[in-house]
Image (cartoon, grey):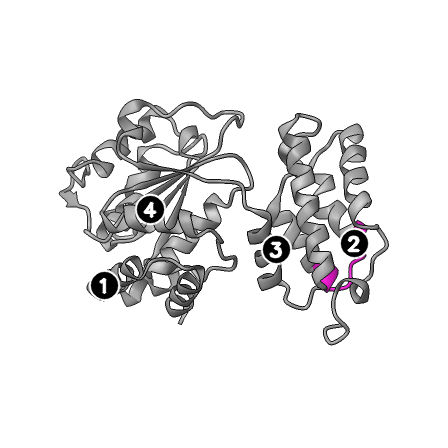
């Protein structure tokens, strides 16, 4: 089972046994409803980082909501998905786009062909069924959307639906916000909303953990090349931090996707162009990024040069 895989992974990470037992007790107390079992994530990627795991598990077991804050490529959304998988909870993703208002979050009246009924939104469904709501890019939310969250996230743990009953939030429900810095359209969270979260600053993945991530995802990749791809990521991070290039090229998921394309037979240069270089649209910047890449990874590497013979 996915939950057992996550617990085995956390044990291997060295997460404290008391926290693991807390997660097991939580899952025994709050088994997922069969109706929403398909919403329990099957984590495609695993988040590596014992200290971050222990801090997050501790906060969630204490009943707190969690805000994952940090720059791009720190694995915030992957980690939020991993947390829902570890606790065995159905997950609802809420994207705070420009059209995200109270009706989008809570629900609205709709006609079902016979009568007008209430169609619940993701926050309402999560609250009723004890899910994990991932509030993606919460610092892009409009004031109307933020107002909805105040009573949901504080000690009242309730939602007032105009014209309908007051909904008490299920004791298993948790709300996990993610927040990037410096993106267009973002702003500082107001003090009232920020106080409703335990805030976890997400660190950039370490080289050792990145090597483990690449190795777990692509176990047939030659060990020396894992190191080259890991160092490529950190060179791009360094150049983005010094503003030599934009952070569009700093895409960990893109790097892993490129390796996956190489495993399928795409030449290294073409795969890295599609998954990293071409995500910026400035010709000069593309050249800079490509120069960084080719200094580490020749553009003409074939699958048999990257993966072991047993996999080729």
Image quarter hosting the N terminus: bottom left
Compared with 184, 206 (above or below) is: below
Percent x, y for residue 268?
79, 54
Q: Which is nearer the N-term, disc 3 or disc 4?
A: 4
For label 4, count other residues whose C-alpha is less than 10 Å away and answer few (under 14), some (14-19) or many (20+): many
Left or right of 74 in this view: 31: left
Find the distance from the CA under tag 3 to the CA under tag 4: 36 Å
* Image coords of residue 83 (percent x, y): 38, 53
| Residues at circles 3 and 2 in contact by the CB criterion of under 8 Å | no
Could you tell me how far apart the alpha carbons at marks 1 and 3 are, in whole angstroms?
A: 33 Å
Q: CA distance from mark 1 to mark 2?
A: 46 Å
Circle nearer the viewer, 3 or 4: 3
Query: How many discs appear?
Result: 4
Q: Which residue is at the front of the view, 95 or 116?
A: 95
Q: Which tag, 1 or 4, sits closer to the chain's start?
A: 1
Q: Which residue sits at x=71%, y=27%?
A: 244
Q: Nearer the viewer, mark 1 or mark 3?
A: 3
Res. 122 mark: 4
Give neighbour class at mark 1: few <14, some 14-19, many 20+ (Cα, 10 Å).
few
Looking at the rendering, in which quadrant would you find the C terminus? Answer: bottom right
Q: Tag 3: Cα neighbours inside 10 Å, few (<14), some, or many (≥20)? A: many
Magenta highlight range: 261-269
Q: Which residue is mark 2?
A: 268
Q: Earlier in the sequence, mark 1 or mark 3?
A: 1
Quadrant in the picture for residue 138:
top left
Question: Can residue 292 be seen?
Answer: yes
Q: Is residue 69 left or right of residue 294?
A: left
**Contact? badges 1 and 2 (CB < 8 Å):** no
Residue ID for mark 3: 211
């Amino acid at each position: 089972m996915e939950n057992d895989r996550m617990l085995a992974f956390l044990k291997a990470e060295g997460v404290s046994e008391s926290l693991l037992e807390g997660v097991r007790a939580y899952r025994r107390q709050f088994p997922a409803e069969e109706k929403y079992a398909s919403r329990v994530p099957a984590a495609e990627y695993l988040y590596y980082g014992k200290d971050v795991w222990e801090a997050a598990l501790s906060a969630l077991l204490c009943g707190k909501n969690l805000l994952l804050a940090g720059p791009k490529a720190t694995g915030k959304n992957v980690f939020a998905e991993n947390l829902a998988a570890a606790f065995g909870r159905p997950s609802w993703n809420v994207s705070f786009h420009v059209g995200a208002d109270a009706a989008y979050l809570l629900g609205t009246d709709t006609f079902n062909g016979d009568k007008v009924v209430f169609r619940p939104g993701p926050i309402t469904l999560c609250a009723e069924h004890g899910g994990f709501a991932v509030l993606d890019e919460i610092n892009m939310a409009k004031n109307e959307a933020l107002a909805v969250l105040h009573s949901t996230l504080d000690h009242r743990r309730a939602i007032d639906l105009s014209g309908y009953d007051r909904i008490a939030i299920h004791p298993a429900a948790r709300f996990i916000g993610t927040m990037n810095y410096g993106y267009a359209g973002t702003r500082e969270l107001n003090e009232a909303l920020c106080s409703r979260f335990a805030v976890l600053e997400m660190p950039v993945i370490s080289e050792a953990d990145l090597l483990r991530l690449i190795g777990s995802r692509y176990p047939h990749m030659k060990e020396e090349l894992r190191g080259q791809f890991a160092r490529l990521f950190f060179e791009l991070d360094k150049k983005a931090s010094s503003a030599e290039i934009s952070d569009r090229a700093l895409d960990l998921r893109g790097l892993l996707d490129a390796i996956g394309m190489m495993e399928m037979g795409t030449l290294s240069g073409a795969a890295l162009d599609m998954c990293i270089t071409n995500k910026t649209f400035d010709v000069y910047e593309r050249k800079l990024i490509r120069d960084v890449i080719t200094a580490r990874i020749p553009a003409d590497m074939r699958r048999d040069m990257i993966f072991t013979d047993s996999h080729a």
